[in-house]
Amino acid sequence: MIEVTDLTKRQGRTTVVGGLTFRVRPGRVTGFLGPNGAGKSTTMRMMLGLDHPTTGEVHICGAHYRQLHDPLRTVGALLDAKAVHPGRTALDHLRCLARSNRIPARRVGEVIELTGLEHAARRRAGEFSLGMSQRLGIAAALLGDPAVLILDEPINGLDPEGILWIRRLLRDLAQQGRTVFVSSHLMSEAALTVDHLVIIGRGRLLADTDMNTFIDRHSDAGLRVRTPEPQRLRDVLAGAGITVAEPADGSLEVAATAERFGELAARHAVAVHEVARKSVSLEEAYLLLTADAVEHRAGSRGGAHSSEGAHPSGGAHQ
C-alpha cells in the first residue's frame, strides 16, 4: 500500500501540493488525475524521495522510500521515459540496474520479452522513439518484480497496439495483487483501465473514490427514452407533472426514476423501445469537477488565458 498523509510542498509563496491525504491499495489500478499544473508529478516525486515535502509524509509498504532496503524490488517507477543514458543499449541499461540491485540476470531477458523489446535490446537508448523509450522504462520498473508500481503517463508515445498492451499489463498486475498507481491525462484511456480515482486540482484533493461512484455522483438524475410514440408519451408524462427534454438525437430525456416511468408507460400502454439511465462519461464528470482548477483555458476566439501565478498561496505547478 502507498499511504500519503498531509503531504504539502511549498516553493516560496506558492503551494505546489497542499495537504494531500489518500491511500493507494493493492489489487486495483488507481488513476491519478488532474489538470496541468495540479501537482501530480511533484506528488509522485515526493513518493519516491526525489523531492522533499515541506510537511507530511509518504509510506510505501510501511516505510519511506529512502528506508527501503532493496527499492527496485519493492517499487517499480517510471517518471521520465527519456531518463536513460543515450549511449547505453537497452540491454546494458537493464543489466546495470539488475546488478546494482542484486536482481538475477535472467530477469533482464524476462522483462525484455514482456515489453516487446527483443529486436531493439542492442540498440542505443538515444535512438529510441518515445514509445520505445516508454517500453524500456516499463521494463526497468518491472525488473525487480515489485509489489508497487508508480507510473507517470506510461502511454505517452505508444501506438494503438502499445496502448492496448499497457492497458492489459496494468490490469494483470493489479489482478496479481500489486499496487498500481498511474497518472494520465487521457480520460478515455483511464475509463478503460482504472478502478479507483484520485483527482487533484491546484495541489488539493478533489476526489478519492471508485470509478463508478464518481461517474454516478456527477450524472444527472433521470432517464433517456426512445419510443415510436413520442407525442403520446410526452402527454402522459406532462399529465403526471414530469419534465421532458428533447435532445437532437430523437430520444426523450425524462426527469423520473425508472420505477415511476415504467408504471406510467405500462398504465397508458405506451410502446417503449429503449430506457437508459442518463450518465456522463468519465471525461465529462472530470471536467465538471476540475472546472475551477484549470491553469490554462482556451479563449473563445482562439486565444488563451491563464491563471498561473495568480494564486501565490494556493496555486500548483506540475
Image (cartoon, rainbow, N blue to C red):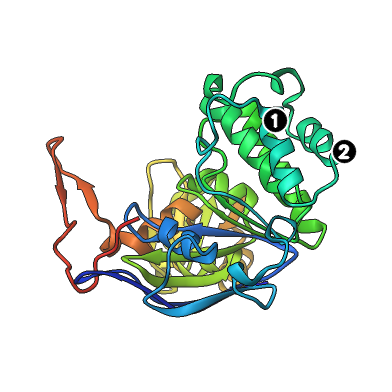
Residue most toward the front? 100
Task: Name the kind of residue labelled 1 in the image.
Answer: Asp
Nearer the observer, 128 or 300:
128
Contact (CB < 8 A) between labels 1 and 2? Answer: no
Q: Earlier in the sequence, mark 1 or mark 2?
A: 1
Q: Would you say residue 166 is visible in this rendering?
A: yes
Q: Check the picture and name the quadrant holding the N terminus.
A: bottom right
Q: Which residue is mark 2?
A: 106
Mark 1 Cα-neighbour bin, 10 Å: few <14, some 14–19, many ≥20: some
Residue 19 at what x, y percent from top left? Answer: 39, 79
Task: Name the kind of residue labelled 2 in the image.
Answer: Arg
Question: Quarter-wise, where is residue 265 in the image?
Answer: bottom right
As drawn, is 194 to the left or to the right of 74?
left
> Gap between marks 1 and 2, in whole Å?
13 Å
Residue 76 at what x, y percent from top left? Answer: 67, 53
Q: Residue at x 57, y 73 (%)?
A: 260
Q: Secondary structure at mark 2?
A: helix
Above or below, comparing residue 305 to residue 316 in the picture: above
As drawn, is 134 to the left or to the right of 304?
right
Q: Residue at x 52, y 63 (%)?
A: 215
Q: Which residue is mark 1?
A: 92
Disc ID at residue 232:
none
Residue 206 at what x, y percent from top left? Answer: 41, 71
Q: Check the picture and name the quadrant holding the C terminus.
A: bottom left
Nearer the observer, 46 or 179:
46
As drawn, is 49 to the left or to the right of 1?
left
Q: Residue at x 75, y 64 (%)?
A: 27
Q: Nearer the viewer, mark 1 or mark 2?
A: 1
